[in-house]
Image (cartoon, grey):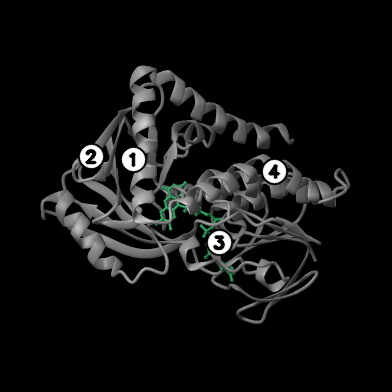
């Protein structure tokens, strides 16, 4: 019997395993793939406060620091935001995930890969695809949008079609401004969603589209049109993948009996932007620490996790409510136009205000995990 079994060996799961193992408990980490997906199924964008906290550069993971963000609401309206104090960072997430798994290995975590969870017999027994059985006192569900444990213990994990961000992304070789991220909201490329160019360097970029599910659209055609227009038809594609991110209300219960749910499994990605890396690291890390403390008798209940995550959950719920209000074409365009207009003018008048405000929000998230020792 392991003290903690984590299902899902990606960003939230590996972080949970590391923080539990650092507190001396026995941990098994179960991942259905043999190794992290390369390239990662992600735009790979984060803020520089998080990048610094994660020590990405010391890990030798490439990081491209972005100075400008161009937002297009239509072909006639674009806002350019020049960052003054901070940078957006496009990083090699696959390299980061490998570093996390190296760390789990050094900490003695049992990594079971190439075999996924097939069934769960509460409260302890995990049955894998190869029928191997392992037991855990505490189970952490970090299995992404499928929420594999959650749905087997009666938590309502159903997502409305429009609450699933359906994405497609290509790694594109062409000529790019490596200092500038470009996003394009709504039509013609990403109806009720957005399209992005996240440059890795001057000759390579992640170009993708994310739209709400339930629309009868051919994602490949939408992406092709976007890439054609952004590169003037001069490009090569290295790879393309499709993936989904929850753009839903966070789960009301992140804890049930001996199970904790983290990352995308808990629907902790931001419903308006689809960004979920920081939430995955925060929730995974906290869950790992609290699980270990429960085993070691230092904390009486896993419910502490729910309590510490309450501010984050409230913020995500508010964002979800905002998203659901933009449910018609007019409201969508008007809503985002107003939002970026205000953002743009505040930033022009007093660049420090906006960037410092965002920095404070991120610092608060990070300190939540740092303070819980
Ligand atoms: C196209 C795209 C672009 C994105 N871009 C960004 C971005 O730029 N910035 C940002 O902050 N966020 C971004 N996100 C969101 C971000 O990638 C997710 O929020 C984050 O990956 C969630 O991490 P996770 O570990 O919780 O889940 P996942 O990354 O989904 O990992 C879940 C893991 O569980 C494993 N698993 C699943 N089922 C089983 C099973 N039965 N048994 C064992 N293992 C299992 C999977 O193989 C996977 O490794 C993007 C998402 C998409 C789809």
The residue beneath circle 2 is 77
Disc 1 crowd rating (10 Å Cα; few below 14, some 14-19, many 20+) is many
Q: Nearer the viewer, residue 75 or 206?
A: 75
Q: Which of marks 1 and 4 is in front?
A: 1
Q: In this view, does 13 lie to the left or right of 99?
A: right
Mark linked to residue 144: 3
The residue beneath circle 1 is 337
Q: Distance between the residues labelled 2 and 1?
A: 9 Å
Q: Quadrant of the N terminus?
A: bottom right
Q: Distance between the residues labelled 4 and 3?
A: 20 Å
Mark linked to residue 310: 4
The answer to whether marks 4 and 3 mark residues whose Cβ atoms lie closer than 8 Å is: no
What residue is rendered at 30% in x and 66% in y?
219
Q: Which of marks 4 and 3 is in front?
A: 4
Relative to 47, is 351 above or below? above
Q: Nearer the viewer, residue 154 or 36?
A: 154
Q: Is mark 3 within 8 Å of ligand 1?
A: yes
Q: In which quarter of the image is residue 192?
A: bottom left
SS label for mark 4:
helix
Residue 46 position in % (x across, y down): 44, 40
Q: Which of marks 4 and 2 is in front?
A: 2
SS label for mark 3:
helix
The answer to whether marks 3 and 2 mark residues whose Cβ atoms lie closer than 8 Å is: no
The answer to whether marks 2 and 1 mark residues whose Cβ atoms lie closer than 8 Å is: yes
Q: Which of marks 3 and 2 is nearer the N terminus?
A: 2
Q: In this view, does 359 lie to the left or right of 311?
A: left
Disc 3 crowd rating (10 Å Cα; few below 14, some 14-19, many 20+) is many
Relative to 127, is 367 above or below? above
Q: Nearer the viewer, residue 79 or 38?
A: 79
Q: Distance between the residues labelled 1 and 3?
A: 32 Å
Q: Is residue 275 left or right of residue 80?
A: right
């Amino acid at each position: 019997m392991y003290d903690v079994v984590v299902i899902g060996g990606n960003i939230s799961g590996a972080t949970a395993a590391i923080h539990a193992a650092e507190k001396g408990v026995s941990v098994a980490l179960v991942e259905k793939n043999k190794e992290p997906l390369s390239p990662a199924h992600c735009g790979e964008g984060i803020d520089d406060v998080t990048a610094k906290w994660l020590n990405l550069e010391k890990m030798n993971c490439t990081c491209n620091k972005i100075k400008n963000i161009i937002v297009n609401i239509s072909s006639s309206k674009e806002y350019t935001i020049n960052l003054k104090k901070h940078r957006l960072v496009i990083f090699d997430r696959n390299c980061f995930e490998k570093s996390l798994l190296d760390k789990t290995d050094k900490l003695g975590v049992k990594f079971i890969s190439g075999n996924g969870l097939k069934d769960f017999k509460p409260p302890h027994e995990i049955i894998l695809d190869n029928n191997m059985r392992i037991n855990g006192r505490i189970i952490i569900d970090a299995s992404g949008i499928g929420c594999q444990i959650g749905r087997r213990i009666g938590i309502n994990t159903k997502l409305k079609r429009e609450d699933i961000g359906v994405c497609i992304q290509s790694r594109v070789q062409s000529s790019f401004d490596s200092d500038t991220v470009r996003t394009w909201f709504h039509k013609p490329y990403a109806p009720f969603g957005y399209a992005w160019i996240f440059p890795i360097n001057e000759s390579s970029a992640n170009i993708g589209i994310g739209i709400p599910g339930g629309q009868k659209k051919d994602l490949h055609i939408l992406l092709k049109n976007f890439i054609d227009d952004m590169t003037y038809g001069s490009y090569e594609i290295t790879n393309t993948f499709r993936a989904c991110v929850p753009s839903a209300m966070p789960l009301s219960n992140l804890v049930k009996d001996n199970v904790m749910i983290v990352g995308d499994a808990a629907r902790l990605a931001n419903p308006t932007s689809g960004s979920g890396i920081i939430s995955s690291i925060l929730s995974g890390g906290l869950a790992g620490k609290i699980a270990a403390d429960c085993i070691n008798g230092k904390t009486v209940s896993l419910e502490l996790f729910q309590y510490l995550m309450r501010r984050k959950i409230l913020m995500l719920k508010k964002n979800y409510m905002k998203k659901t209000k933009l449910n018609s074409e007019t409201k969508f365009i008007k809503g985002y136009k107003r939002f970026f207009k205000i953002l743009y003018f505040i930033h022009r008048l007093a660049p420090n205000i906006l960037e410092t405000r965002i920095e404070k929000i991120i610092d608060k998230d990070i300190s939540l995990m740092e303070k819980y020792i």
